[in-house]
């Protein structure tokens, strides 16, 4: 069993493997004497302990983030699938929405596959109430599957929230660049969905103030015109970036539109659990 060969193979998929174990010079020095100190029969156990220390904690954290993302994707996929099945989408927009629906279903499949490949179990699809009524079916958006303007309004809130949620979890994926890259790829697609839904609402005359990007006022991040989703846009009115207050450079609407704000995991769960996700 040649440890250097093993590490060389791991380095091909994780260039930082030496740094995870220790500084490169120390790893090479210690491994040179590793074989003489550990009995052959104990080598697999010793190696398992070594790599668990290097990857165990980060993998657990990454799986937690991925399962959180999977829960959000379950919700979005269910929304578009049900919207399509219920016939709320007019024929002129069906092709447009079909692309978004296909993306969301692919995101679900992808995340389940990645979580399983990490040796973990994907979370099950939660109980979902698309009316936002926590299982009553009589929530504030109970007409979302029968009224197309409402369907698009809720879709806009879902997509904008999804973009902010993915951004909020990016720092927790820094330990695995492969997963981080994949998550950022989904984040970019969710942003395109958000812009697409926003433009559609504007072009159809459902909202004269909605633009393909979020435009906040000094006191309110929410530009959807729907007070019930104010929490989904909390913080979007921020005009300070990297410690620099940009309010003197342009109007608040311009400054806020130039930046997007992350949304913490707990904030997202507080918004969804007990409304769309049946608690």
Image (tube, grey):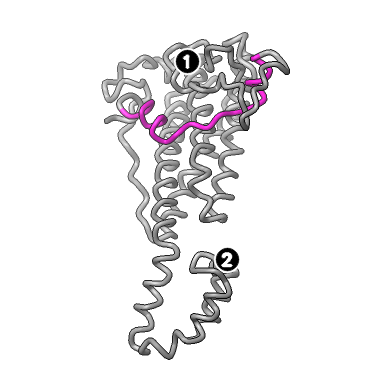
Residue drawn at the location 43% of the way across and 91% of the way down: 36
| Res 92 seen here | no
Say if the magenta span includes residue 254. yes
User: Answer yes or no: do the residues labelled 1 and 2 have beta carbons within 8 Å?
Assistant: no
Question: Which of the 4 image quadrants contains residue 218?
Answer: top right
| Res 101 seen here | yes
* Dot in front, 1 or 2: 2
Residue drawn at the location 34% of the way across and 46% of the way down: 123
Q: Residue 25 appears at what percent x and percent y? A: 58, 75
Question: Which of the 4 image quadrants contains residue 217?
Answer: top right
Nearest to the observer: residue 238 or residue 254: 238
Which secondary structure lies at badge 1? helix
7 displayed left or right of 141: right
Q: Residue 214 appears at what percent x and percent y? A: 60, 21
Q: Is residue 14 above or below residue 124?
A: below
Magenta-colored segment: predominant secondary structure: helix
Q: Residues within 10 Å of mark 2 (few under 14, many from 20)?
A: few
Q: Is residue 177 above or below residue 205?
A: below
Q: Residue 78 appears at what percent x and percent y? A: 42, 33
Which sits earlier in the primary sequence, circle 1 or circle 2? 2
Q: Residue 203 appears at what percent x and percent y? A: 65, 15
Residue under pointer 1:
150
Q: Quadrant of the C terminus?
A: top left
Q: Is residue 99 above or below residue 111?
A: above
Q: CA distance from mark 1 to mark 2?
A: 46 Å
Which secondary structure lies at badge 2? helix
Nearest to the observer: residue 94 or residue 2: 2
Residue drawn at the location 44% of the way across and 60% of the way down: 117
Say if the magenta span includes residue 140. no
Q: Residues within 10 Å of mark 1 (few under 14, many from 20)?
A: some
Q: Which residues are magenta?
A: 252-273
Residue under pointer 2:
13
């Amino acid at each position: 069993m040649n440890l250097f060969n093993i590490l060389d193979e791991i380095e091909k998929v994780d260039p930082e493997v030496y740094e995870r174990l220790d500084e490169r010079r120390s790893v090479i020095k210690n491994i040179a004497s590793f074989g003489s100190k550990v009995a052959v029969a104990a080598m697999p156990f010793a190696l398992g302990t070594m790599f668990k220390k290097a990857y165990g904690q980060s993998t657990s954290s990454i799986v937690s983030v991925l399962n959180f993302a999977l829960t959000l994707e379950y919700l979005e996929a269910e929304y578009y699938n049900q919207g399509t099945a219920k016939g709320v989408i007019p024929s002129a927009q069906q092709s447009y929405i079909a692309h978004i629906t296909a993306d969301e279903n692919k995101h679900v499949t992808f995340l389940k596959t990645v979580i399983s490949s990490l040796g973990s179990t994907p979370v099950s699809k939660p109980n979902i109430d698309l009316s936002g009524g926590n299982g009553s079916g009589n929530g504030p958006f109970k007409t979302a599957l029968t009224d197309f303007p409402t369907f698009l309004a809720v879709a806009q809130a879902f997509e904008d929230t999804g973009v902010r949620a993915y951004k909020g979890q990016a720092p927790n994926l820094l330990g695995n660049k492969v997963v981080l890259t994949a998550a950022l790829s989904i984040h970019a697609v969710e942003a395109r969905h958000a812009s697409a839904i926003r433009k559609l609402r504007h072009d159809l005359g459902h909202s004269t103030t909605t633009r393909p990007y979020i435009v906040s006022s000094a006191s309110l991040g929410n530009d959807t015109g729907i007070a019930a989703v104010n929490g989904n846009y909390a913080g979007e009115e921020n005009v300070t970036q990297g410690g620099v207050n940009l309010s003197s450079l342009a109007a608040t609407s311009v400054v806020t539109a130039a930046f997007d704000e992350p949304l913490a995991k707990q904030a997202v769960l507080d918004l969804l659990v007990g409304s769309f996700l049946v608690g």
